[in-house]
Image: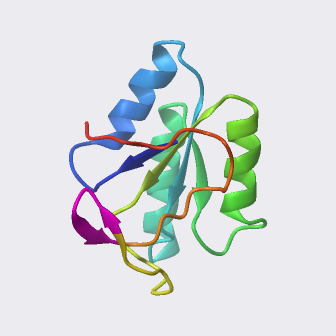
Amino acid sequence: MFALPHVGNYDQAGAGIGASGAGSVTAVAERLRPEAVYQRFVAFREGLGMEVLPASGGSSSPSGVLAQRLRAGQIAVLVCDLDVTGGGIEVNFFGEKGPHDRRPRRRSPSMPAQH
């Protein structure tokens, strides 16, 4: 599990991870409006080989799907510097306040990263 800020281009980082053979990458994306904009982002990321889960409005919980992917040894990335639902709690992250840690409660390592 990689926790990424909105810095750099995580799309290309995900493509690089996949191309290197390190595993497949699953990302959770904010559902943008209008829907056509969201679909273009999804199509771009899927074209790079990433699986994209909507943060809201999907057929299943992104947390459950992420837990499945992590159990299968795959890589998951979350952009973690925005609380898009407004329901998170602030936590201490390297001495700074930030949104609640939303990673699945599993034994997978969680690594802050910046590309």
| Residue at the outermost top position | 21
Identify the residue at horizontal 50%, vertical 60% (top origin): 29
Magenta stretch, residue numbers: 92-98
Residue 93 quadrant: bottom left
Identify the residue at horizontal 39%, vertical 60% (top origin): 80
Q: Is residue 104 left or right of residue 101?
A: right
Name the spot of residue 84 as percent of width and height, x first. Answer: 43, 77
Name the spot of residue 22 as percent of width and height, x first. Answer: 53, 17
Identify the residue at horizontal 67%, vertical 50% (top origin): 66
| Residue at the outermost bottom position | 86
Majority SS type along the magenta span: strand
Query: In the rendered view, how is the structure colored?
Result: rainbow
**In terms of depth relative to the viewer, which is nearer, 99 or 34?**
99
The number of discs equals: 0
- In the picture, which quadrant includes the C terminus? top left
**In terms of depth relative to the viewer, which is nearer, 102 or 22?**
102
Q: Is residue 94 magenta?
A: yes
**In terms of depth relative to the viewer, which is nearer, 83 or 43?**
83
Name the spot of residue 97 as percent of width and height, x first. Answer: 27, 72
Whether residue 49 is situated above or below residue 41 in the rendered picture: above
Q: Is residue 89 magenta?
A: no
Name the spot of residue 60 as percent of width and height, x first. Answer: 78, 65
